[in-house]
Image (cartoon, rainbow, N blue to C red):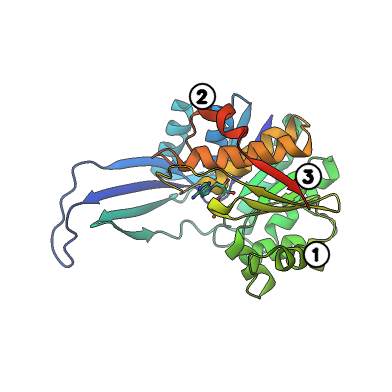
Amino acid sequence: MILAVTMNPSVDISYPIDEFKLNDVNRVENVCKTAGGKGLNVARVVVQMEEEVLATGVLGGMIGEYIIQELTKGSIQNDFLKINQESRNCIAILHEGKQTEILESGPTLSSEEGRAFLQKFESLLAKVSLVTISGSLPKGLPTDFYHQMLEISHAKGIPVILDSSGESLKHALLHPEKPYVIKPNGTELSQLLGIEVGDTISSLKKAVDNYLFNGIEWIVVSMGGEGAFVKHGGNYYRITLPEINVVNPVGSGDATVAGLAVALNCHQTVEVVLKTAMTTGMLNTMEAGTGFINMNKFKRYFNEVKVEKL
Ligand code: ADP
């Protein structure tokens, strides 16, 4: 089983409005509410791939209850630490082809709540063979919190796919207990290294050879429609994709993480791992919903992904 962690989940609300009026009343008819957060997207895609997954993290209040209800409706097993504060709403107003977002920052966790989650995390590791950690940390937790989770999973010999960015990712890379996989996109890679990484093979190679990544088995730099650049076991790979009809790319990185998790958990070959991850990413872009893939199309697109060892 795969454990999918989301430390700051949300209810994502979208308001489609023909014409957004500032400083006036805007009425909405077709409100869409979903359980959001990167790790929840990962869990959703893993379930669609018919593999077992357990969603965990921290949530609370009525919004937290709604998230649990939605996960249960979608047959996603879940075991979250419940806190006394409300989880957050993230609102997207879709108007005139634009998207205006209002993102609540969410609860501020106390150090006791942080410790309680680490205890829960440790106990859940007994049930799983791989962990995915996605997204940002809630307020109140120290920036080395993901590193603390890595220490715990390292002690139990459970590999971790860490898909985060900024300081929490950087902290996690500075210690001997490394994630097994990281999946930065181009922007996150540039941010992490503090330089603009170009998309040529030589600049990508130079970037993934940075000392920060020493000891990480898989560095998967996802590049949207351009596929990915990967370093694994001292080898470099360039992956290219077929032309597809993109409907909604939001969450494709999470679908990629789900594909990586499922294929690695089944001990697939390098080529199958990379093709699976790219295919789930592509399939997510072809659906309107975030974290949804149509597995009937899997084989067709899988066969069109090209993995070139450099
Ligand atoms: P993130 O969502 O984390 O920014 P990317 O945008 O790099 O990640 O997308 C992750 C993966 O999803 C890509 O490697 C690719 O497999 C797929 N993908 C994303 N956008 C497209 C696109 N426009 N065409 C084809 N595949 C895409």
Question: In terms of image quadrants, where is residue 67?
Answer: top left
- Residue 209: mark: 1
Viewer-proximal residue, 277 or 149?
A: 277
Cβ atoms at labels 2 and 3 below 8 Å apart:
no
Q: Which amino acid does label 3 sit on?
A: Ser
Q: Mark 2 points at which residue?
A: 296
Q: Label 3 to label 1, Cα distance in Å?
A: 25 Å
- Tell me the element at label 1: loop
Placement of 200 over or under 41, stated as above or below: below
Compare marks 2 and 3 and give the one earlier in the sequence. 3
Q: Name the residue under label 3.
A: 153
The mark closer to the camera, 2 or 3, is 2
Q: Where is residue 262 in the image (x, y as percent from the top left)?
A: 67, 33
Q: Look at the image and tell me whether residue 202 can be seen.
A: yes
Q: Label 2 to label 3, Cα distance in Å?
A: 34 Å
Cβ atoms at labels 1 and 2 below 8 Å apart:
no
